[in-house]
Image (cartoon, rainbow, N blue to C red):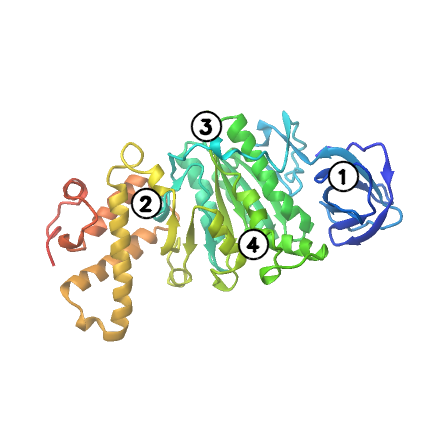
Amino acid sequence: MTTELYAKAHRKIQDIKGPLVFMSPVADVKYGERVVIVNSQGRKKSGQVLEVGEKAIVIQVFEGSDGLDRKSTAVFFTGDIVKLGLSDDMLGRVFDGSGNPRDGLGEVYPEVERPITGSPLNPVCRQQPKAWIETGISSIDMLFTLVKGQKLPIWGGPGLPLNAVTMQIARQVIRQSGEELVVVFAGMGITSREYNYFYKEFQDSGALASSVLFLNLADDATIERILTPRLALTTAEYFAFDKGRDVLVILTDLLNYANALREISSAREEIPGRRGYPGYLYTDLSTIYERAGIIKGQKGSITQMPIVTMPNDDITHPVIDLTGYITEGQILLSRALDRAGFYPPIDVMPSLSRLMNLGIGEEKTREDHRQLADQLYALYAQGKELEKLTAIIGSEGLGTFEKRVLKFTRRFEDEFINQGTQPRSLKESLDLGWDLLAEAPRGELRRVEDKHVEKYMPKREGVGAEA
C-alpha cells in the first residue's frame, strides 16, 4: 500500500482503544479513506476511516496502535481509499495480512491498483455456474461436487483435520487442473506452527508456483484479520477478471475473522448481538462470500471454500449459522469418523452442494453421476439407521437384506470415505461407487436406471441378485 503523506497533519486524537483511534471531527473526511499515522518516533502506520460522526472520527489502524499516544501522534488523511497493488508477479509469493511481502523476496511492482473492498457485482451480470472443479476427494467430487463460481464452506470442530483437508484440496485442484487454476490462500489468526505447515506444504508440493498466500498470524495486529480476506479476494478478482484465470479462494479460519470483528465492535462500544458478535455480522460476511462468481461475457471465475471452526461442535453457532445462509452448501467433518481413524472424515449425511446439478451430468462429468450419487446417499442413510437398530436388538434379528445393506455401509466408509491422502480421479470414484452398489439387492436400486446398471455395474457372480 502506498504511504505518501497528505498535506496537513492533524493532532486531534481523543482516545485510543485497541486498534482504533478516535479523533475530533475533521472537514471533508470520507468513510473508507486511507490514513497514514506517524508516531513520535517517526514510525508510519496505515489506517482506514471506519466511521465519520458528528462527535468523532473512528480510524482503524492496520498495524495496531502500539507506540501511539494522544499528544504527539500525527494523522494524515490521503483523500484516497485503501488499495492493493496487483501483478502477475504475485504468483508464488507470500504476504502478510496487510499485503506486505512476508517471504523476503522484495516488493512486487504493481501493474494496477484496486480498492480492497472490491466493486459490487450486478446480479444481472452474473453467469450461472456450469463447470465443476475436481478436488481428488471422492466424497466431494462424487456426492457434493464443487462448481466453478460456487461458495462451498468446510465446517469442523476443534481438533479435526481441517488444515490437512484444506491443504489436500489446494494441492490436488492445482494438480488436477494442470496448474491452470490459481489458488489464493488466506490464513487469518493462524499460529506459527500452522504458518510453517501451510508454507511447507505449498512449497514441497509445488503448488506455491500457482498460488498467492496471505498469512496473518495470531500475534499480528487484530485489524489485519479484517483486511486479509479482502486482500485475497481483490487478488482473486485480478487473476479471474483481468487475466481470465479460474481462481479458488481458500479462507481459513472465518471464526478468527468473526472474533476479530467482535473485538473491534466491542472497542467501538457497539450494542452486541448473538454471543457478543455485532448485529451486522451477516452483512459483513456477505461482503466476503458474495465476491465469488462468474461474470457474463468474461473469462475466469472465483470459487470460494471458506473454512470455519465450530466451537464445541456447535452447528448453531452464529458464524456457522450465518455462513450457511449465505453460501451454497457445506462440507461437514465428523468427529466420530475421525476418532475411528477415517481420513478425510467427511460426514456425508449433513453435507450438501446446492449447485452440484449445474456442474455434473453428460458432457460434464458422466451420464450416471447424479443417479449414482443419489443411490449411494440413500443406501448409506438406510445403513446408518440400521446401525442404530442393530445396537438395540443385535444383528441376530436382521434379515438377509439388512445384512447386505450393513455390509455396503461398512465398505462405503472403509473404501469410499476413507481414501487417505492419495487423490482419486472422478472416474475412479464413479467406478468404486458402482462396485459398492453390488453389495445391495438389485431390487433396492430404485434411483438408478437399468441402462446405467447394465453399463457400469461390475459383472461378477452374485451381482444384481435379489434379497
Seen at 60% across and 28% down, the residue is 87
Seen at 56% across and 54% down, the residue is 255
For label 1, the residue is 35
Q: Residues within 10 Å of mark 4 (few under 14, many from 20)?
A: many
| Residue 225 visible somewhere in the drawing | yes
Q: Amino acid at mark 4?
A: Leu
Side of 95 where 333 appears, left or right: left
**Mark pair 4, 3: CA separation:** 32 Å
Given residues 131 and 123, the one toward you in this image is: 123
For label 2, the residue is 142
Which of the image's four quarters has the C terminus? bottom left
**Mark pair 1, 2: CA separation:** 49 Å
For label 4, the residue is 255
Q: Which mark is residue 296?
A: 3
For marks 1 and 2 on the same chain, the one whose residue lies earlier in the sequence: 1
Give the image quarter of residue 429. Answer: top left
Q: Nearer the viewer, mark 3 or mark 1?
A: 3
Q: Amino acid at mark 1?
A: Val
